[in-house]
Amino acid sequence: LETPTTEAARPADAAFRRASLERLIGLAVFGERVAAKIYAVMARLSSDHAAILRRFAAMEGQHSAWFVEAAQANGIEPDREFADRELGYLLEQVERYEAERSVESLAVLQGFIVESLAIATYEPFLSIADRYPGTRDAFARALEEERYHVEWVTRYLRLRFFDAEAEFLALAEKVNIQGIDCIGGTMMNIADHLDAIGLSGADCAGAMMDGYAALLERVGIERRLAAKSVVGLFMPLIHKYRRGERAK
Amino acid sequence: VSEGAGPEDDATERLLFTVLRRFEALALSRYERDAPALATAAKRALVAALDERARGDAALEASELGRPVEALLATLREGGPTSTLLVQGFVLERLGRAIYAVVAGDARSGPAARALAESGLRASEQAAAAAGRLLEEGGFTGAALYDALSRTARPALARLDALGEGVDAAFAERYRLRFADLMGELAADLIEAGLALGLERRKLVCFLAGALMGR
């Protein structure tokens, strides 16, 4: 299945549900490894915060290991090909920001946008986790730690851009264009898979939009502007979803 | 005809005002039937001015916006009084406001177009505010407002996406009026208005995401 399914042909059969589980757990397993890589890059670029960022990298790596175990416990083979296709665009952005030595860009991309996707999907997953033995503890602990990372990144950005909200707005606008296109695109690409395993892809998308907008607010972007910007950036992705096209 | 505008620009302007006339005329007729407080003198004057400006539907019928506009209008005709108040008054007046604000603030709009857009902006703001007051008076706050909104607004919001490509093709170059920006404005404005009436922000954003995704 190369494209999200359209409303008319959205399958709910066992094979699609199985494929959805493989894709979602694949994205979680390999996405967490990419998150570990991003925090490791940030640690190399930021001597002031290297220790805690290395610790975050290790925590993300641990999440990946937990998810591998959870997948094995349920006989699910993580779909690496799907994950690689979703994560390639993200890695391109990481390489560019690393070349620019922009820890702030990586902080917004990983600490806000990627973490918003993780939280928007892990949190509702807990409501159905008991259907998949061994997953509740892994996702609950990962969720708690992702929130901890977001809290730290929020404080870091608030201090870094203290009395410099306009500078932060410019940074967010720069990172958002490709960051939302990439990670929001992934959210659209997994929406039907989330539906297939018993969640609501639309609610997850809404939670990601609202969660990310709220984080921008916490660093100083006015509430209305944050919502307008995030929703506006999601609209082309929603349009592709409606047309049954892959978002990226 | 706008000062300094060429024939192509005039056609763009006529198309814009034709689209707005269709929606404003329907809104006014629904307000007269279901919510007279929203059928303000400013709204009536706006519809009359748009009628004069658009001079028929030919511009719309010849455009790629024709079919999605007709489809949305057909959906809007289906609702009852609650739908009028919520969908027309509380939601779509905010979309109109966003459109008028762009045209009124764009120096490339002719003086007459800017004046008309400013009238539209004021009329939409009045109607949206009146809708909010009526909703509050009618007990549509918090969970009750969410229930009514999710029951009535979903079909219209789902149809908006089909307008996107046509809006961008017709108006992005001339007015910098882009569908994604308009929807961002609509969502941001709805969130503010919803919060004022006790809506839970997360629930509202999830509802909007789902409706726009066609769920």
Image (tube, coloured by chain):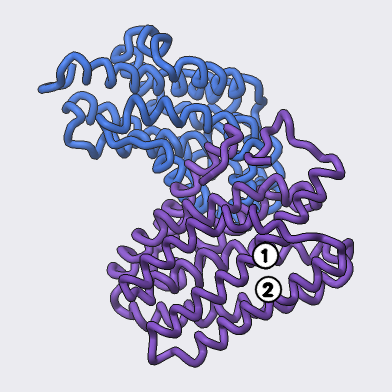
Chain colours: A purple, B blue
In the picture, residue A2 is in which quadrant?
A: top right
Element under disc 1:
helix
Residue A153 tag number: none
Image quadrant where one finds the N terminus of chain B: top left
**Which chain letter goes with mark 1?**
A
Residue under the image location 26 percent in, 35 percent down: B104
The residue beneath circle 2 is A64
Instruction: Give above or below for B119 relative to B74.
Output: below
Which amino acid, mark 2? Ser
Residue B100 located left or right of residue A18: left
Residue A14 position in % (x across, y down): 86, 44
Instruction: Give above or below for B45 relative to B102.
Output: above
Residue under the image location 54 percent in, 65 percent down: A114
The residue beneath circle 1 is A28
Residue B159 position in % (x across, y down): 57, 29
Residue under the image location 61 percent in, 34 percent down: A244
Is disc 1 in contact with disc 2, using a CB cutoff of under 8 Å? yes
Residue A34 position in % (x across, y down): 56, 69
